[in-house]
Image (cartoon, grey):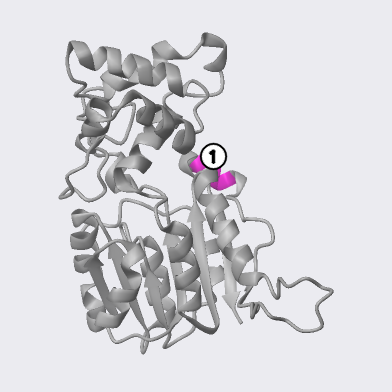
Amino acid sequence: MPAAPHIPVMAKECVRGMNITRGGTYFDGTVGYGGHSAEILSLCTPGGRVIATDLDDEAVAYTSERFREYGDAFVVKKRNFKDFQSVLDEEGVEALDGAILDLGLSSLQIDREERGFSYLAKDAPLDMRMDKSQYLTAEKVLNEYPEEEIARILREYGEETFAGGIARKVVKRREEKPLRTCGEFSDIIESSIPYRFKQNGPCQRKSFQAIRIAVNGELDGLYDCVVALARTLKSGGRIAVLTFHSLEDRIVKNAFNTLETDCTCDKSLPLCVCGKVKEINVITKKPITASKDETEANSRARSAKLRIAEKI
């Protein structure tokens, strides 16, 4: 079997931050090529196990084969990591020693032009599905959603200043003929942004990110998932979350802040009536970022932020 063709961002920092112990049970919610799972398995076995999920059929098939030698110590299921509780129930796991969520796309997805994630893949179909069996695609969003909804998606999920103009051109273009390729959408974005705003890298990145988030519902339920996953940890267990854009990072930060906050009652009250107790200690008061060497070797690491918390 070929070696894993993808090394996850800040792999050592993620696994070191999780404080893996021999015999522990761990959850890898976005297994990809299994970069994190490989590190965790090397430290928690024998006696430990990794339960993993991913929506990508290829990721599930790849890691099933890659970690075959571990037998029952590695289980991977084609599921959304937000459904972790049902997965743990199926495996008879009541509490975890640690968990990791790598919310970035893997090379498995980006480098396959037919998946339609990259604005560089001009002839690729407007797909962008992490789960290729789902109905909604980028093509359907751009050809069927109202102009106002497309603008909202670009503005909220891509933080795109020129969202309204891009959405108008998308609607005007599809009235002539439907958009089918990444190149067609890329050209619309290019023509909608003034030249002086194109000096800080490709101008298509924000809009492609926004449509991808909408297609896959990436932010839906993320806050609740992080909170619930942290509560599934044993005392001393750690959760590590790796994000790649400010929207994800803000959600994770807020989830951690909620769990770390103690009583919120008015201080003038003699007794606590809210019942809120501190549930975690945030290990990373500021998120960890990739080293200079890593960002030079892998441009995808530049926007990465790692946050880690420990269950009390």
Residue 307 at least partly seen = yes
Residue 206 against residue 303 in the figure, above or below = above
Span of residues in magenta = 293-297
User: In the depicted view, which residue is nearer to us: 166 or 129?
Assistant: 166
Q: In the image shown, does 61 or 80 lie closer to the viewer?
A: 80
Task: Answer with the quarter of the image where residue 29 lies.
Answer: bottom left
> Which of the 4 quarters of the picture holds residue 295?
top right
Residue 188 vertical placement versus 111 (above, below): above
Tell me the residue at 72%/81% (across/down).
272
Q: Position of residue 134 (x, y in %)?
A: 18, 48
Could you say where residue 254 lies in the image, as x and y percent from the top left?
59, 58
Query: In the rendered structure, which amino acid carries the disc numbered 1?
Result: Glu
Residue 219 is a magenta residue: no
Question: Residue 267, relative to residue 206: is it above or below?
Answer: below
Magenta-highlighted stretch: main secondary structure? Answer: helix
Q: Spot the residue most to the right.
A: 268
Horizontally, is 259 left or right of 222 in the view? right
Examine the rendering and report whether any part of residue 282 can be seen: no
Q: Which residue is mark 1?
A: 296
Residue 294 belongs to the span the image colors magenta: yes
The location of residue 207, given as percent across then percent down, is 41, 29
Q: Secondary structure at mark 1?
A: helix
Q: Quadrant of the C terminus?
A: bottom right
